[in-house]
Amino acid sequence: MPPDAFDAMVERVVGLVDAPWDADLLDARGDPEYRQVVFGQGLGLLSFRVEDSAELIRIFDITWIG
């Protein structure tokens, strides 16, 4: 991953720490804990699971097309 892409991803993850629910559902029919957000001017996609009880975000997929 290019350094600019990594920086954009980190910036987006930092924002998710304060507002993890400010993200799209991964699958509209699925579990609301599974979310995704774009980053890096729309060139990256980050998929994660929110665990409210543990106050944890588990990132399980990062895609970069840039």
Image (cartoon, grey):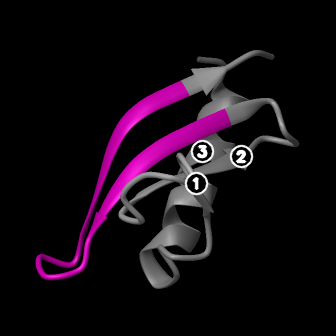
Q: Nearer the viewer, mark 1 or mark 3?
A: 1
Q: Which residues are magenta?
A: 45-62
**Mark 2 or mark 1, which has the lower sequence index?**
1
Image height of 64 relative to 28, above or below: above
Q: Is residue 50 left or right of residue 55?
A: right
Q: Which residue is mark 2?
A: 38
Q: Classify mark 2: helix, strand or loop.
A: strand
Mark 1 vs 3, N-terminal side: 3
Q: Residue at coordinates 42% horizontally, 65% vertically from top-left?
A: 32
Residue at x-position 75% and y-position 15%: 65
Q: Quadrant of the N terminus?
A: top right
> Where, quadrant-wise, is the C terminus in this rendering?
top right
Q: Please indicate whether residue 48 sits to the left or right of residue 40 in the image.
A: left
* Cβ atoms at labels 3 and 2 below 8 Å apart: no
Q: Residue at x 43, y 74 (%)?
A: 17
Q: Amino acid at mark 2?
A: Val
Check whether the beta carbons of the residues at disc 1 and disc 3 lie within 8 A of each other. Answer: no
Q: CA distance from mark 2 to mark 1?
A: 17 Å
Secondary structure state at the residue bearing disc 3? helix
Give above or below for 59 relative to 31: above
Label 3 neighbour load within 10 Å: few <14, some 14-19, many 20+: many
Q: Residue at x 50, y 29 (%)?
A: 62
Q: Report the side of 61 relative to 51 (left or right).
A: right
Secondary structure mostly taken by the magenta-highlighted segment of the chain: strand
Q: Position of residue 57 (x, y in %)?
A: 30, 61
Label 1 sits on a secondary structure element that is: loop
User: Which residue is denoted by mark 1 in the rendering?
Assistant: 28
Which label number is shown at residue 9?
3
Chain-order first, disc 3 or disc 2? 3
Q: Quadrant of residue 25?
A: bottom right
Q: Are marks 2 and 1 in contact (CB under 8 Å)?
A: no
